Image (cartoon, rainbow, N blue to C red):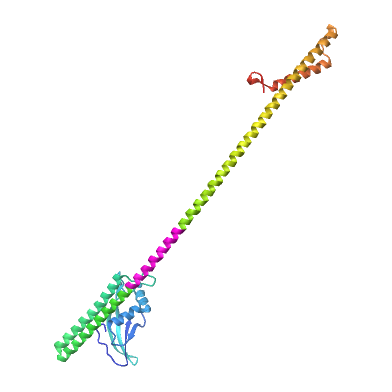
Amino acid sequence: MFGLKVPTGADVIAEVRFTLTRGGPFVAWDGPPEATDADVTGDLLASRNVVAYLWAAVDRGKLQADEMGFVSIPARVVALQDGKVFFDEKVTIGLTLPTRPGDLPMSGFQLQREMMALLSSALSTMQKAASEAIEQVSSASIAAIQAASATIEKVSAASMSAIQQVSIAHEKTMERAQEGLDHMSAAVASAIKEVNAAHQKSLESAHQALGQMTAATSGAMKDVGAANLKAMEQAHSALTTVAASADKLTGLADKIFEDSRERAQALVHEARKGQPQSQQSPLSDSVRDIKAMTDLMMMVKSVTEDKDNGGAKK
């Protein structure tokens, strides 16, 4: 496990502990000591608590993550039997953290990086196991060489299994991404159809409203024109009536003026004829009344005549 020979047994339980914070260690994984690196890293990445713990450590600066979310985690592999620790070794585990909750699904490049991280971990395990096997061959016997060979075969099998699991996970992810894309395309097409239908309906409503407005405006203009023509006819008729009345009034005033003037002249003549010469200077009261009436008629005539038009009647 991660290049360590963890003791095995019926009652032995292996644990992977993270010590990134103060206090007791965080038990990120527990299981059989025969578990492969791929099994352990797969369980770690599948645990929401572990992922949240690692992202929190990144946010606090306890871990350094690159742009793809790859981190190197210092950890301890512990073996327990009957609740007691009898094996405890330090290791470094490389993981590519999944996206934070609410982020987009992991891209293909991220999946490739995850696969490369698993391969790197497996190759590192193989190299360490091979180095140990070589040292045992140098210092021990043929039995050690055979044990090393068996170990290499197991590691190779574990590496191939990890590669196959990563490939299967990559294919499933691509299939899910394609399904999501198909659903999104269908939703977008439906939304475009609804928008086009609403737009066409709005154009028809606007055209209908414009037609109604045009008809109403045309009718209103016709009504206004008819009312204006009728008003002009009534005004012309009224002006004609006023002009005829004015002509009649002027003629009547002229006649009254002529009659009054002739009657006044006759009365004045008779009055002067019947009185002595010495008494002709002062006029009698009747003559004065006639004279006043004559002056009044002259004023009426001056009012009814248009001085600006050569004395013609208004």
- Report the number of discs: 0
- Tell me which corner region of the image, top left, top right, bottom left or bottom right, holds residue 13: bottom left
The quadrant the C terminus occupies is top right
- The overriding secondary structure of the stretch rendered in magenta is helix
**Location of residue 263 with respect to 29 vertically, above or below:** above
Q: Is residue 194 visible?
A: yes
Return the x and y of residue 101 as percentages of the image width and height: 38, 72
Residue 250 lies left or right of residue 70; in this view the side is right
Please tell me whether residue 31 is drawn above or below residue 311 in the rendered image.
below
Residue 218, quarter of picture: top right
User: In the image shown, does 300 or 255 lie closer to the viewer?
Assistant: 255
Q: Is residue 194 magenta?
A: yes
- Residue 304 colored in magenta in the image: no
Q: Left or right: where does residue 275 sit relative to residue 24? A: right
Residue 17 position, x and y percent, is: 32, 83
Looking at the image, which residue is at 49% across and 51% down?
Answer: 207
Q: Nearer the viewer, residue 162 or 243?
A: 243
Q: Is residue 96 visible?
A: no
| Picture residue at 58% right of the left edge, 43% below the top | 220
Q: Position of residue 282 (x, y in %)?
A: 82, 12
Q: Residue furthest top?
A: 277
**Residue 239, x across and y down, in percent:** 66, 30
Which residue range is magenta in the image? Answer: 174-197
Residue for point 15% across, 89% down: 139
Picture quarter with the N terminus = bottom left
Q: Quadrant of residue 47?
A: bottom left
